[in-house]
Image (cartoon, grey):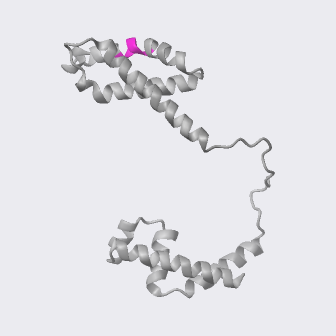
Amino acid sequence: MESSQRGDQLAYAMLLRELLPLLRRVVGRKWRSPQDVEDIVQDILLSVHSVRHTYDPGRPFMPWLMTIASRRIADTARRRSSRSANETTVEIMPETSSLDDTKNEQDVSDDRQELLAALSELSPSQREAVQLMKIEGLSLEEASIRTGRSVASLKVTVHRALKALRQSLEQRN
């Protein structure tokens, strides 16, 4: 590690190669899934790479490395724990249509006509904001540049336009 800190890329590549089996064993004691082990090992190696400048050559390397490894393992466990706390298991998947098109052409045409009619009821500035941000997919900053309006003004305009569209479509149905 000391040589790699001085810019010896060959020493750094050799260090990483030698660390792989060790890190796989260490992580493998905590995690059983080979995919999880590889993901955590890669996370550890990325951390080592990004903080390698903090290693003090006057101190032992292994405690420094194992501290990084134990923290990455703990981070992964925390992420998994918090994610699984919000997940539910579905025993039977709901049935869905295997067809690509679930609406017929007339339904799609009717939907389009209703949406176009609702859009025509908007003010020109609201129509432009919806067109740029929701249909063309521009970001607030890009739409701001194109229209010459502030980001805050565009946010308010789009919010009000979508609210008006929603109300108009609900009244039509």
Relative horizontal placement of residue 101, taking residue 26 as reference (left or right): right
Residue 135 lies, with reference to residue 115, above or below; the image says above
Residue 43 lies, with reference to residue 91, above or below; the image says above
Predominant SS of the magenta segment: helix
Q: Which quadrant is the C terminus positioned in?
A: bottom right
Relative horizontal placement of residue 50, taking residue 122 as reference (left or right): left
Who's the residue at 29% across and 28% down the image? 51
Who's the residue at 40% across and 75% down the image? 154
Who's the residue at 56% across and 82% down the image? 164
Picture quadrant of residue 12: top left
Picture quadrant of residue 107: bottom right
User: Does 38 lie within the magenta span?
Assistant: no
x and y, in percent, of residue 100 in the image = 74, 57
Q: Which quadrant is the N terminus positioned in?
A: top left
Q: Nearer the viewer, residue 136 or 122?
A: 122
Q: Which residues are magenta?
A: 16-20
